[in-house]
Amino acid sequence: MLVRRKFTHTAVFDLNTFIHLSLEFLVCHELSHFDLGHFELADKFGVAQRSRQVVHTIDVVRYDLRHLAALCLEMQADHEATDTLLGAYSAEGWREVREKVLAISGMMMLIEREEAKLDFDEKTHPKAATRIFQLLCHVAEMPLIDAHLQLDASLLPQADEIERFGKEVTLPCYFDAVYLAEVAGAKSIEADLGSPVDFFADMAIVKLGDPSRYSDLKTNGAKEWAQLWECNEKLKPTMQAFA
């Protein structure tokens, strides 16, 4: 029997599809650790590991940022897995994008909730809200990615199409994540996501690419993202995948 749940903008998502896509993201995430060479940098990985993760590139990271190194690897794997699962931008299939983003968000929330049950003081994954913030930043940029990579403005969709994508995909994806947190009773995740005004204002700040503005970030997810961004910039030169 298929279980269906109503989400924002009257969209209805199938639970079986949700579970399949969530597991697909998880597999892509773990494979991304391998592809990015993370197994050479850290002792082990897992959905919610119980032992401390030792990252062997901490000599290039400021002492006060070293505890964030393992979290940066998780964000890197998230980015690669998201890119794989969502694929390239298309003017069609926007509903499928929302389904995939919802499933990814759900897995991120599940990991945070399961990790909270462990008797382990040190975090092994970033906040779910932080990961969802990065995820939706990627979604918002999808129509622009090809043009940026190819340095060819002719590849940009029409302005009205980009605007529609924001209204029909990026914005609803945020509300889908908030609703999913409500359904799961994950009050802390819902609070970390913040209000839509603050969430999208933070996205706008990050899009400017000016680290001096990161002190203006308001949501907990965006604030942790900014912390991890600084640490990740220190890690990247030492990693073959980013060389």
Image: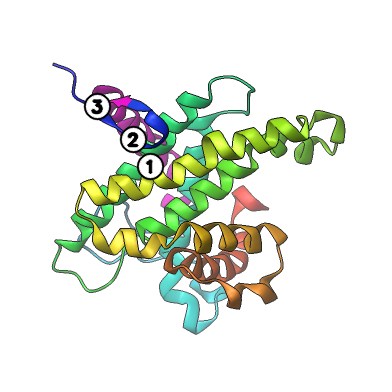
Residue 228 lies, in percent from the top left, at: 51, 67
The mark that comes first in sequence, 3 or 1, is 3
Q: Main secondary structure of the magenta part?
A: helix
Q: Residue furthest bottom?
A: 64
Q: Start and end of the magenta stretch?
A: 13-40
The reply to whether residue 13 is visible in this rendering is: yes
Residue under label 3:
15
- The residue that appears at 20% across and 61% down in the rendered structure is 50
Q: Is residue 230 magenta?
A: no
The reply to whether residue 40 is visible in this rendering is: no
In terms of depth relative to the viewer, which is nearer, 225 or 175?
175
The kind of residue tagged 2 is: Phe
Residue under label 1:
176
- CB within 8 Å, label 2 to label 1: yes
Query: Are there few (<14), some (14-19), or many (20+) residues within 10 Å of tag 3?
Result: some
- The residue that appears at 38% across and 35% down in the rendered structure is 25
The colour mode here is: rainbow
